[in-house]
Amino acid sequence: LSAEGAALVNADDQTWKRMTRATRARGMTCFAGSRPDGAACAAEILGASIRGMRMRLWGPWGNIEASVPLIGTYNLMNVLQATSACFELGMDATQ
């Protein structure tokens, strides 16, 4: 990625530090689970059923609680990184 790009890195992956060092783009580390100190963004599952899950997302956009018709930690990360991408593109939480 170029220096003008944004690297949305899954920090639950063991190689996340290497990925952030390997790019010139500004990095946004994304964690699924409780928010560690210094994390750019994080998400946690508040509840889940066969119909989907309720989640909380934290990031430079603030705090968002939402429900999606998906389940699983991998989908939690997908929603978090999609939200991060929208933020990087200039959208806010009300859009």
Image (spheres, rainbow, N blue to C red):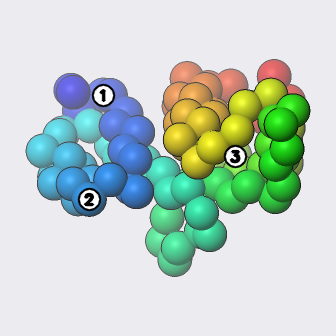
Query: Horizontally, is 3 left or right of 26 in the view?
Result: left
Query: Horizontally, is 6 left or right of 36 in the view?
Result: left
Circle 2 residue: 14
Badge 2 vs badge 1, beta-carbon distance below 8 Å:
no
Element class at badge 1: loop
Q: Please tell me how crowded label 2 is: few (under 14), some (14-19), or many (20+) other residues with Cα within 10 Å.
A: few
Q: Quadrant location of the N terminus?
A: top left
Mark 1–mark 3 distance (CA, rounded to whole Å): 20 Å
Q: Residue furthest front?
A: 50
Where residue 3 sits in the image (x, y, percent)?
A: 23, 32
Q: Quadrant of residue 45?
A: bottom right
Circle 1 residue: 4
Circle 3 residue: 61
The residue at 50%/57% (across/down) is: 31
Q: Is residue 13 above or below residue 85?
A: below
Which sits in the foreground, 94 or 64?
Answer: 64
Q: Quadrant location of the C terminus?
A: top right
Where residue 62 sits in the image (x, y, percent)?
A: 74, 53
Q: Please tell me how crowded label 3 is: few (under 14), some (14-19), or many (20+) other residues with Cα within 10 Å.
A: some
Which sits in the foreground, 61 or 73?
Answer: 73
Going by the numbered disc 3, the residue's amino acid type is Trp
Mark 2–mark 1 distance (CA, rounded to whole Å): 25 Å
Q: Please tell me how crowded label 1 is: few (under 14), some (14-19), or many (20+) other residues with Cα within 10 Å.
A: few
Going by the numbered disc 1, the residue's amino acid type is Glu
User: Looking at the image, is mark 1 or mark 3 earlier in the sequence?
Assistant: 1
Element class at badge 2: loop
Residue 87 in view: no
